[in-house]
Image: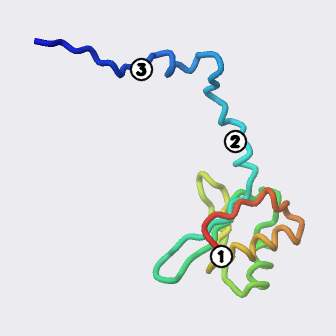
Amino acid sequence: MLCRQPQCMASLEAFNPSVPGIDAFEDDADATTQKDLIHIRVQQRNGRKCITTVQGLSEQLDLKKIIKAVKKAHCCNGTIVEDEEMGQVLQFQGDQRDAVMSFLVDNSICEKGKIKKHGHG
């Protein structure tokens, strides 16, 4: 009877985060830059209907005025939704990603580099 030892056992040092050269918290810089971004997403509702969500805006901004201006300029409805994790999130009817992005940049609310537009198109 042959007794075989497993030959594919990896070294435990490779999985140890205390090994020099491996930083367990190297993604912290990416996480802080993600929090500084304004995320504009489109979510499919049913059929052809969709909503645009905007999150990450500063709490010092008057979100009601932003909603009112975008609604009037682009003929869509919008609301402010309070989320536990994300804070206050703006919602607009339809795919308004480009409209919201241009509105934020044109009115100097934020720079174009700080806006992350999700989705295709």
Q: Secondary structure at mark 3?
A: loop
Which residue is the site of mark 1? Answer: 92
- Dot 2: few (<14), some (14–19), or many (≥20) neighbours within 10 Å? few
> Where the N terminus falls, by quadrant?
top left
Circle count? 3
Which of labels 2 and 3 is toward the front? 3
Q: In the rendered view, would you say 87 is above or below 75? A: above
Which residue is the site of mark 3? Answer: 10
- Residue at x 77%, y 67% (from the top left corner): 63
Rendering coords of residue 115 (x, y %): 75, 60
- Residue at x 80%, y 79% (from the top left corner): 69
Rendering coords of residue 113 (x, y %): 81, 57
Which of labels 1 and 2 is toward the front? 2
- Residue at x 80%, y 73% (from the top left corner): 102
Which residue is the site of mark 2? Answer: 30
Residue flagged by tag 1: what amino acid is it? Answer: Phe
Toward the front, the furthest residue is 2
Label of residue 28 in the image: none
Sequence-wise, the earlier of marks 1 and 2 is 2
Rendering coords of residue 103 (x, y %): 81, 73
Toward the left, the furthest residue is 1
In depth, the one of 105 and 91 nearer the eye is: 105
Residue flagged by tag 2: what amino acid is it? Answer: Asp
- Residue at x 37%, y 19% (from the top left corner): 9
Residue flagged by tag 3: what amino acid is it? Answer: Ala
Q: Secondary structure at mark 2?
A: helix
Residue 20 occupies which quadrant of the picture? top right
- Dot 3: few (<14), some (14–19), or many (≥20) neighbours within 10 Å? few
